[in-house]
Amino acid sequence: MSDERLEQLAGQAGLAVHWTDANGRPQRVSDDVLGKVLAGLGHPAGSPEQIEASLRELAEVQQKGHLPPLLTVDYGQPLDLSRHFAANTALQVYQEDGATLDLTLDEQARLPGLLPVGYQDVRIDGQHFTLAVAPLRCYSVGDALGQETPRAWGLGVQLYSIRRPGDGGFGDTQALEMLARSAGERGADALAISPMHAMFSSDNHRYSPYSPSSRLFLNSLYAAPGTLLGERAVRVAIERAQLAEELQRLEAMPLVDWPLAAAAKQRLLKTLYEDFRSGDHPLNPDFASFRHAGGEALENHCRFEALQADCATRGQPQDWRQWPKDWHDPRSPAIAEFAAQHQSDIEYYAFCQWLVARSLERAQNAATSSGMQIGLVADLAVGADGAGSQAWSRQDELLSALTVGAPPDILNRAGQSWGISAFAPEGLVRNGFRAFIEMLRANFAHAGGLRIDHIMGLQRLWVIPLGSSPGEGAYLQYPVDDLLRLLTLESHRHQAIVLGEDLGTVPEGLREKLAPRQILGMRVLLFEQHHTGHFKHVLEWPDDALATSTTHDLPTLNGWWHARDIDWNHKLTLIDSHTEHQWRETREQERRGLRHLLGQDSANFQGEAHEADQLIDASVRFIGHTRAPLVLLPLEDALGVDEQPNLPGTIDSHPNWRRRFHGQAAQLLDDIDAARRLELLAHARQQASERDR
């Protein structure tokens, strides 16, 4: 009986007890794992008594029928309120534009679909809630370009990898401005960048952009203070901090040395802050306005940064879950007392956020003023570190006791644990989806588009108890329709496109939900095969997904052709000899298959260039000819480099998130190979546009 009750509890908590793996085989989550995951969700299930108590608690919530603070609906559709109110109940709607509507629920207790798109305040029978009325689809590539059948193209870049004189060891928003202008002048409409989420200022050894402290704020290391404060102010600060020699040394390095480069940049930022606050700076009003607009969320993030720095200085744990209990609540008297004693430190972190936000805003302006119709496409990580700022400030809405990953499959037999926490579905509903909405707004703020990493997470995520192996997890269901409506609404309000990374095991029906909302999926050349070595014809590629040659987690085209990824796995002993032999045989089949596909275009493989160069040229032309509304070419493939930015399954053994390009950002696209490939891509996109009219 307890097993049945445990399954019942799991189902009510949104866990899938039974699921199908990547090989199509049915699986069941063990009772032991269910108990641990349920505990991480806040529903203790370690004994029959705990299971019954948790079931009663969930039943009480459902029986009370609490009206959530926010409901969602599609524009033009009625909203069923029969669970909460009787038919013909009168109500008032206070619209965003200030107008008031007097309405009545219909005979089925539904709110008629008469409300305009936006967040509307509904008052009914002494209660009130916000109704998010979503447009039927997101702002699209077609909207951005003013074309019914768009065939746009752009580039993808790891921000840290680009160079400019005086960058101090890694790319920043000033280098991004330079690259954006150069790409826009060549006809690009988009520039997709790696995540810029806030990291851990007190721990510069944590630099994976997909494991941030907070997705609400930005990584201040990417700020280009000279563009805001002036180059003279930066030169004076460098001299005062005695950083010139160190910055030059770091800038000359072939790889980013994150601990040293971040420490040097932070010394520079600290000196700039001291200079800024020492006098009556003309930008003081703008900084004050920024801080006021940031409100409680910005204040909490800056307090968290100061708290972590204080802990680091005293040799105490930086994970807030190990802090004294009176530091767990951001609103506690102890935190207020700390803030009063560390006002300058907190203001410094706000100053850093101001610098990077204004710097990113400049980069987006540079992109659009150069002719791009979309501009920057920001990247939204699937979660945030459970020890970080966002988890601390939004504890009821994030699962800090569970981590996110993937179950074992044919490629990752041990499964994956990504070391990040995700939203709590129940907490989101309880709090009117506040944390989700504020996150979307923060990431749409200075971009013309948003790429959502692992968009399957809007429907379900594989969650794992802390300390457990990746296989000891379960799928947690999310209110996907509500989340998609809110995403659609925010896309519409920000006039920004949405891209969904839908690679891997995609839940049944999700793509059918994304396509009508014009959330573009992603199709990668190296994956588009019917079976090994049999690549899909150009007309088989869909028109509801972007097209690209590769991703940051895959080998570059050059690296794939020369099996650099297999070489790395062999070198690091990540595979045995049998697996390596099979992998190399499969790669040879794929090489022949791709060569055959691309060879069907008579324009390909002409001349005497190296075969790999011709393969890259042909691949660029091929994805340009697809029906994708948007093609994104990674800068690595435009330049023909052979090393990939990240090798999944490794941390320090491969230089993940550290590789830099040799040329300067302003001249990078003048490279003979890059210039040729961008011209090939632009021409192919024009041909695709003419073909598909």
Image (tube, rainbow, N blue to C red):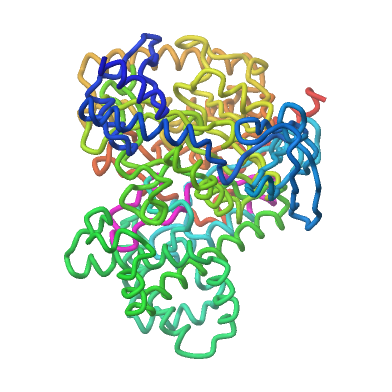
Question: Residue at 37% of width from left, 15% of height from top?
Answer: 18
Q: How many discs mark residues in the rendered view?
A: 0
Question: Residue at 35% of width from left, 47% of height from top?
Answer: 385
In front of the other: 567 or 77: 77
Q: Residue 70 lies in magenta, yes or no? A: no
Indicate left or right for 132 with 174 as reference. Answer: right
- Residue 464, x across and y down, in percent: 30, 32
Q: Which span is picked out in magenta?
A: 182-210
Indicate left or right for 606 with 431 as reference. Answer: right
- Residue 526, x across and y down, in percent: 49, 23
Residue pushed farthest bottom?
279
The C terminus, quarter of image: top right
Residue 629's image quarter?
A: top right
- Residue 646, x across and y down, in percent: 37, 39
Q: Is residue 197 visible?
A: yes
In front of the other: 106 or 615: 106
Q: Residue 191 lies in magenta, yes or no? A: yes
Q: Main secondary structure of the magenta part?
A: loop
Indicate left or right for 340 with 549 as reference. Answer: left
- Residue 568, x across and y down, in percent: 28, 31
The N terminus, quarter of image: top left
In front of the other: 14 or 306: 14
